[in-house]
Amino acid sequence: MKKILIDLKNLDKKILSVMKSCLKYSFWFLIIATIVLFTYEAFYAIPNLFYIGLSLFKTGLYLIVACFICGLAFNRIQKELKF
């Protein structure tokens, strides 16, 4: 865990900016999913809203994880290419 935190602190500026924009996009994705799920909870009219909201929520969480993994991987590759 400490190694991951150290790697996150030593990220390249360009990779960090791409990760931040990806996290912002994922955050908005999660907000939209939450709104869809709240709409389903409030009205119960369309059962498909639950599955749509759940799929959007899972996709948002996967995007966050992929953003961190890809950012750390690209940073490591970039550091290895410099040596």
Image (cartoon, grey):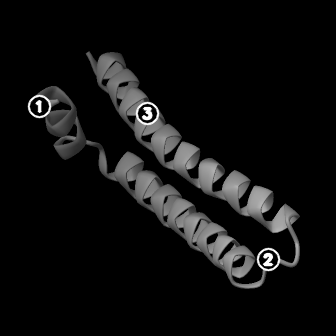
**Which residue is denoted by mark 1 in the rendering?**
2
Image location of residue 70, percent across then percent down: 47, 34
Image location of residue 81, percent across then percent down: 36, 18
Locate residue 66 relative to residue 14 in the image: left or right.
right
Depicted 48 relative to depicted 81: above or below: below
**Which residue is denoted by mark 2 in the rendering?**
44
Q: Which callout, 2 or 1, points at the residue further toward the start of the chain? A: 1
Give, as a three-letter code, the residue at label 3: Ile
Q: Residue at x 51, y 66 (%)?
A: 27
Q: Residue at x 79, y 76 (%)?
A: 44
Please tell me how crowded label 2 is: few (under 14), some (14-19), or many (20+) other residues with Cα within 10 Å: few
Distance of label 2 from label 1 (alpha carbons):
45 Å
Give, as a three-letter code, the residue at label 2: Tyr
Image location of residue 46, percent across then percent down: 88, 72
Please tell me how crowded label 3 is: few (under 14), some (14-19), or many (20+) other residues with Cα within 10 Å: few
* Nearer to us in this view, 54 or 77: 54
Give, as a three-letter code, the residue at label 1: Lys
- Dot 1: what SS? helix
- Dot 3: what SS? helix
Quadrant of the frame with the N terminus: top left
Query: Dividing the picture into quarters, in which one does residue 37 lie?
Result: bottom right
Dots 2, 1 in contact, CB < 8 A: no
* Nearer to us in this view, 63 or 22: 63
- Dot 2: what SS? loop
Q: Which callout, 3 or 1, points at the residue further toward the start of the chain? A: 1
**Which residue is denoted by mark 3 in the rendering?**
69
Query: Dividing the picture into quarters, in which one does residue 78 lie?
Result: top left
